[in-house]
Image (cartoon, rainbow, N blue to C red):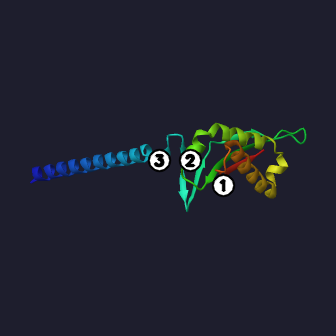
Amino acid sequence: MADVEVSERKSISKIIIIALLVLILLLTAAIFVFVVTDNPVDGLVKIFQSNGEYTIPLDEFVVNLKQDSNIKHYIKIKIALMFTEENNSKVIETNVSKIRDTIISTLRSKTYEEVLNDEETINLKRELVENINNALNDHIVEGVYFTDVIVQ
């Protein structure tokens, strides 16, 4: 009888070990699938669609603001560009450097007070859209979203 109980315990232990190994393998495979199958557009940027609007988030910007006194200020900001035609993602992707340069130039021309004022923020978004479209020589960008802002 004792031999039967010992062999049953060994077989139950083996089943538990095998089940845990299978579970770990499945979890590893699921994590791998989520990490590897991320959906970037040509490997550079991600494109998100919502109700006919497409957005492309840009890398973070850290820019010195225009001095209005002896105190130096800077802005750290994340921006996403909104457009309505999916094929415009290629144009934006191929002109990321030009777009970043335009955004940096626009932000550097703003003072600390202009960036903090809510009305001026709306005007800044309009100005960014206009300047980016002028740099692209086409009306591609419909809006600009600030997804993260720190001003010091």
- x 47%, y 47%: residue: 39
Q: Tell me residue 132's x, y (percent).
A: 70, 45
Q: Which of the image's four quarters has the N terminus? A: bottom left
Which residue occupies the extreme right position in the image?
69
Q: How crowded is mark 1: few (under 14 residues within 10 Å), some or many (20 or more)?
A: some
Which residue in the structure is indicated by mark 2? Answer: 89
Closest to the observer, 12 or 48 = 48
Q: Which of marks 3 and 1 is in front?
A: 1
Q: In which quarter of the image is residue 96?
A: top right
The tally of labels here is: 3
Q: Tell me residue 20's x, y (percent).
A: 29, 49
Q: Could you say which disc has been placed on residue 142 in the image?
A: 1
Which structural element holds mark 2? helix
Which structural element holds mark 1? loop
Q: Residues within 10 Å of mark 2 (few under 14, many from 20)?
A: many
Going by the numbered disc 1, the residue's amino acid type is Glu
- x 73%, y 53%: residue: 125
Q: Tell me residue 108's x, y (percent).
A: 79, 40
Q: Is residue 98 left or right of residue 72?
A: left
Going by the numbered disc 3, the residue's amino acid type is Asn
Going by the numbered disc 2, the residue's amino acid type is Ser
Q: Is residue 85 left or right of residue 134?
A: left
Which structural element holds mark 3? loop
Which residue in the structure is indicated by mark 3? Answer: 39
